[in-house]
Amino acid sequence: MAEEAEHLPARPSWDCRVCGRRWPCEPAREVLSRTHGRMDLAVLMWNYLEEAARDMPQAAASALFDRFLRWTQ
């Protein structure tokens, strides 16, 4: 059986390396949700948000919040 590729971010764009969608894409969210508790997931995604904000200083804070944190609630 072939291994499924991991949906990971490509920096500095933070697009998925596999499907090209904005990361975290749906497959990444599914894996992240399954492998982390709710609080750990929120902390992890906050850390990713901070990294993404440094990589994409032009991005609006509200858009980054929606992209990285809102789905974890």
Image (cartoon, rainbow, N blue to C red):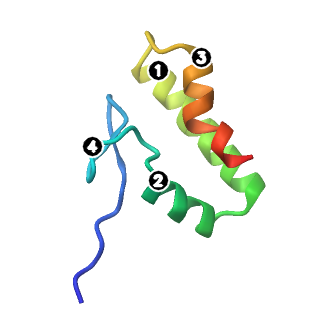
Residue 55 x, y percent position in the rendering: 40, 22
Q: Nearer the viewer, mark 2 or mark 3?
A: 2
Front position in the image: 37 or 30 = 30
The amino acid at mark 3 is: Ala
The amino acid at mark 2 is: Glu
**Which mark sits nearer the N-terminus, 2 or 3?**
2
**Which mark sits nearer the N-terminus, 1 or 3?**
1
Dot 4, crowdedness within 10 Å: few (<14), some or many (≥20)?
A: some
Residue 26's tag is 2
**Which mark sits nearer the N-terminus, 2 or 1?**
2
Is 51 located above or below residue 41 in the figure? above
Classify mark 2: helix, strand or loop.
helix
Q: Mark 4–mark 3 contact, CB under 8 Å? A: no
Residue 30 x, y percent position in the rendering: 53, 62
Residue depicted at x 47% and y 20%: 54
The amino acid at mark 1 is: Arg
Classify mark 1: helix, strand or loop.
helix
Dot 1, crowdedness within 10 Å: few (<14), some or many (≥20)?
A: few
Classify mark 3: helix, strand or loop.
helix
Per the model, the C-alpha gap separating discs 2 and 3 is: 21 Å
Residue 3 x, y percent position in the rendering: 27, 78
| Residue at the spot of label 3 | 61
Q: Nearer the viewer, mark 2 or mark 1?
A: 2
| Residue at the spot of label 4 | 20
Q: Nearer the viewer, mark 4 or mark 1?
A: 4
Per the model, the C-alpha gap separating discs 2 and 1 is: 23 Å
Q: Nearer the viewer, mark 1 or mark 3?
A: 3
Residue depicted at x 30% and y 73%: 4
Is 18 located above or below residue 15 in the figure? below
Residue depicted at x 72% and y 63%: 37
| Residue at the spot of label 1 | 54
